[in-house]
Amino acid sequence: MIVQEKVPGGKLLCVEAEFSSGRITRIRITGDFFLHPEETIDGIEKALVGTKADGVAAKVSEVLASNGAQLIGASPEDIERLVKRAME
Amino acid sequence: MRWRLLPYSENNAFLNMAIDEAISDSVQMGESPPTIRFYGWRPAAVSIGYFQSLEREVDVARCSEAGVDVVRRRTGGGAVFHDSEITYSIIGKEGLFPKDIIASYRQICGSVINALAILNINSEFKPINDIITNGKKISGNAQTRRGGVLLQHGTLIYEVDVERMFSLLRVPDEKIKDKMIASVKERVTSIRQQKYVRREEVLSAMLEGFTRGKEYGTGELSEKELGRAQELAQIRYKTKEWNNAR
């Protein structure tokens, strides 16, 4: 399921995710947001596999912190909100 | 700090993106000074942001028929149709710019705003990464930072052909394409829509806007940068693995 949203005051965020037993089995995050360094997105998507929807924001924040990365135009909470919508 | 100015040149999309990366690498290694670069795109091209889906954003077949290059940028942000516009890059060690990302966009976009002011066009910075004039976007900008180096590139729209742009980009729903075209026309403007100015005048205003208050010398790419750029164009920016990555 693909869901997208123009984040208020931010950029376009699009989440494509599949689930099994309430956990993410595959996820792709696209959009016109910014993330430095850019490759951190691969680590975020990888880390989210196996995560429950309500643990997404915490997991994204953890990967950002461990890579010293900055997400601009969207937040970990925005990603979690879209994952939850993708689950509906 | 003495800046290097690389005067306006036109290249294909792959080499344009590769040159920005090659300069960033040289700046990181301390082999090149901070650099301001002006360029155009020949043939015309569509660039997409690092995190965008190529197939959802671009009609690749139409681009190919039209002879328009398609390239994924190293920076985030949205899809841009590069046809009649002037693109700049500014590349330097992070310490030359504000640490705060929006503050650094604001500072660098200030150079574009200076250039527009020289042309008697009033504009302002609109966070996160746009410059607007009379409420409409006239410049889009994208930044990345890695290895202690900041790269920001952006476009100053000289003329815009929204219909042509939408013939190359995909829209989520074909039925509302006309509406989207109308909405973009309401939200985007160009220098030529603001006033009659020749491209050469815009270029010289950009040069003045970007170099104001800076010590600089006109230069060229080093042999190493050019070689690395040609290599990066081949091994990264022209490849399906890179462009179709998302």
Image (cartoon, rainbow, N blue to C red):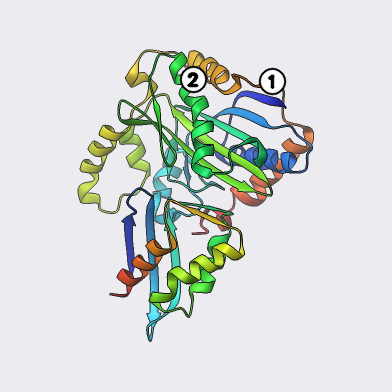
Is A24 drawn above or below residue B9 in the view shown? below
Please provide percent x and percent y for residue B6: 66, 25
Location of mark 2 (residue): B115
Is B17 drawn above or below residue A15 in the view shown? above
Q: CA distance from mark 1 to mark 2?
A: 17 Å
The quadrant of the rendering that contains the N terminus of chain B is top right
User: Which subunit holds the residue at mark 2?
Assistant: B
At 53% from the left and 44% from the top, the residue drawn is B101
- Left or right of B66: which side holds A70? right
Residue B38 seen by the camera: yes
How many numbered badges does the structure rendering display?
2
At 49% from the left and 59% from the top, the residue drawn is B246
Question: Looking at the image, which is closer to me, B173 or B65?
Answer: B173
- Left or right of A66: which side holds B159? left
Is B226 drawn above or below residue A65 in the view shown? above
* Type of amino acid under label 2: Ala
Q: Residue furthest bottom?
A: A21
At 44% from the left and 56% from the top, the residue drawn is B53
Location of mark 1 (residue): B215
At 61% from the left and 37% from the top, the residue drawn is B97
- The quarter of the displayed image where residue B18 is located: top right
Q: Are marks 1 and 2 in contact (CB under 8 Å)?
A: no
| First of labels 1, 2 by sequence position | 2
Instruction: Give the class, few, some or many, for how many residues have Cα within 10 Å of label 1's Cα (few <14, many ≥20).
Output: few
* Type of amino acid under label 1: Glu
User: Which subunit holds the residue at mark 1?
Assistant: B
Question: Looking at the image, which is closer to me, B159 or B215?
Answer: B215
